[in-house]
Amino acid sequence: MIKQTNLYREIHEQPDVLRRLLDSQKGPIEELARAMKKHHIQQVMIAARGTSDNAGVYAKYVLGTMNGLPVAMAAPSLFTIYKHPPRLSNTLVLGISQSGKSPDIVSVLVEAKRQGALTAALTNTPESELAGQADVVIDLIAGEEKAVAATKTYTGELGAIALLSALLADDPIMKNELQAVPEAMSAVLSMNDLVAGAVSRYRYIKQCVVIGRGYNYATAFELSLKLQELVYINAQPYSSADFMHGPLALIDTGFPIIVFAPSGSMFDEMRELIDRVRDCKAEIICITDEPSLAQSVHTPLVLSTSIPEWLSPLTCIMPGQLFALYLAATCGYDVDRPRSIHKITETT
């Protein structure tokens, strides 16, 4: 039954969506990279909401580490309500929205164009109002996303940001690493049955924390959002550093913690965090490509393949998406039509 849902199908479409994007959108993304160099872009401002906002958090880390660009998230109310937008000279203003319809996100690009800033749109709807305000439009070409909870458009956004970073850096190693990601995503989908078998243990949880850091700080936010949307639990995202500065006091026996711990620069810190919360008797779910962690946690979700850390959010989120899908189904919820929310939310 669950395999007939739109959400299940769209989670499993993600490798093909990324392949299409890498094949077809290299031209527009190269155009954007050239325009950024021509305009001497010194910083990036991203306007987005929800899942697309989480993709913007990923951009903050990738464009910062790989390209030396400061990335800020726009505060649309400065544009739409307070009517005092910031100065945007030498700034790329990037709108990210699968629908391209939210008036506040569009307003940020309208003002950017008025100020003469370089604008771009990353969207699954290239005929949208947002795209109409962009100097360069990058089409996610994900196909219609019918499930309310976004999955394939999220990883498409991550892939487009990663490709922009690689092209800006003109780094052949980065480009080759990115080309290998669709195959790695396909391999991760082999975890489907493993995740499906793990969720029944958690059907009665009402709250949890989700922890990631660095590139996977965005992943913690995205999984928290999926658990809120689909399972209606109070899932709060944290970086491992922020979590140790106070929220650690939340932890008591059996408190569920989901930890993203891929190999890379952050791995040792995440392993130390796991040791600390295990001492507090937390219930630990770990998404990792390091089998050595399997004995340290209650529910290890070990990826069958490893990719470079800067790309790991593309694979790490997928077991999380499956976890939210199967947990919602186990609780008897309609995974395609969560209560109270709609596919397109237009805010001002």
Image (cartoon, rainbow, N blue to C red):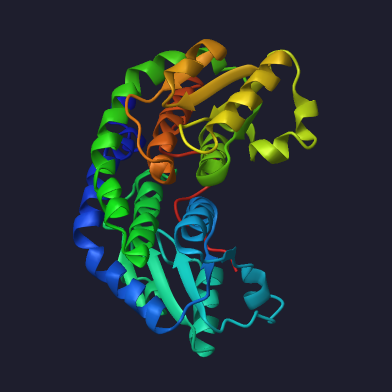
Residue 306 placement: quadrant: top left
Q: Position of residue 168 (x, y in %)?
A: 36, 66
Q: Which residue is drawn at 33% across and 49% down?
A: 145
Residue 166 placement: quadrant: bottom left
57 is higher (above) or lower (below) than 135: above
Residue 101 placement: quadrant: bottom left
- Total of numbered circles in the picture? 0
Q: Residue at x 74, y 16 (%)?
A: 280
Q: Which residue is drawn at 65% across and 26% down?
A: 273
Q: Where is residue 81 in the image (x, y as percent from the top left)?
A: 69, 75
100 is higher (above) or lower (below) than 249: below
19 is higher (above) or lower (below) than 295: below
In which quadrant of the rendered image does the N terminus lie?
Answer: top left
Q: Is residue 345 left or right of residue 306?
A: right
Q: Which residue is drawn at 35% across and 58% down?
A: 160
In which quadrant of the rendered image does the C terminus lie?
Answer: bottom right
Q: Nearer the viewer, residue 236 or 328?
A: 236
Q: Position of residue 185 (x, y in %)?
A: 30, 36
- Can I make out residue 254 in this image? yes
Q: Which of 216 and 124 is in front in this view?
A: 216
Q: Where is residue 135 in the image (x, y as percent from the top left)?
A: 37, 80
Q: Is residue 279 left or right of residue 90?
A: right
Q: Is residue 40 left or right of residue 84?
A: left
- Can I make out residue 233 in this image? no
258 is higher (above) or lower (below) than 94: above
Q: Is residue 259 left or right of residue 238?
A: left
